[in-house]
Image (tube, rainbow, N blue to C red):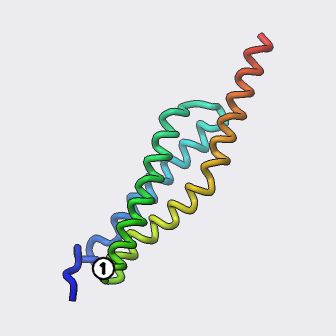
Amino acid sequence: MIQPWFDANLYAWIPGTVFGVAAGVIGSLIGCLLPRGRALRVLRTAWFALGAVAVIFLVIGTVALIEGQPWGIWYCFLLPGAVGALVMGANTPAIFKRYREAEERRLAAKDLI
């Protein structure tokens, strides 16, 4: 039997919880700042960094599954990675479309002055 990477009973909750909290914070910031067209560079960087973490979790979970790690170890990485990659991949075009619309509104308002 292969040696487990860590004790899943004690530590399996950490990756999904940390990822979920980070996604919630970034999502709420996007929800508040997106209509105003504010903090585009910061939120874009945070969004893509969180997407990269989701892909890394997906890879780690897949490697753990292939290696034959116990269920609690591969699942704690595979679930947030798969959900994060799917949700973030699906929402990225809509988010940046809204930023373009906010920028167009700002430029149109500037032209009126």
* Total numbered labels placed on residues in the image: 1
The residue positioned farthest toward the bottom in the image shown: 1
Which residue is drawn at the image coordinates 63% and 31% (left, top)?
37
Q: Which residue is mark 1?
A: 67
Front position in the image: 76 or 10: 76
Which residue is drawn at the image coordinates 73% and 15% (left, top)?
110
Which residue is drawn at the image coordinates 46% and 71% (left, top)?
79
Residue 39: x and y, percent?
53, 32
| In-image side of 53 versus 67 (left or right) | right
The residue positioned farthest toward the right in the image shown: 112
Task: Count neighbours of disc 1 (C-alpha within 10 A) and say few if under 14, some if 14 to 19, many if 20 or more.
Answer: few
Q: Secondary structure at mark 1?
A: helix
Screen quadrant of the C terminus? top right
Front position in the image: 3 or 11: 3
In which quarter of the view is residue 53 placed? bottom left
Relative to 107, residue 67 above or below: below
In which quarter of the view is residue 77 placed? bottom left
Screen quadrant of the N terminus? bottom left
| In-image side of 41 versus 110 (left or right) | left
Residue 58: x and y, percent?
42, 66
Residue 101: x and y, percent?
72, 34
Q: Amino acid at mark 1?
A: Glu
Which residue is drawn at the image coordinates 46% and 43% (left, top)?
46
Front position in the image: 107 or 38: 107
In which quarter of the view is residue 74 placed? bottom left
Front position in the image: 103 or 89: 89
Relative to 12, residue 29 above or below: above
Residue 57: x and y, percent?
39, 63
| In-image side of 22 versus 35 (left or right) | left
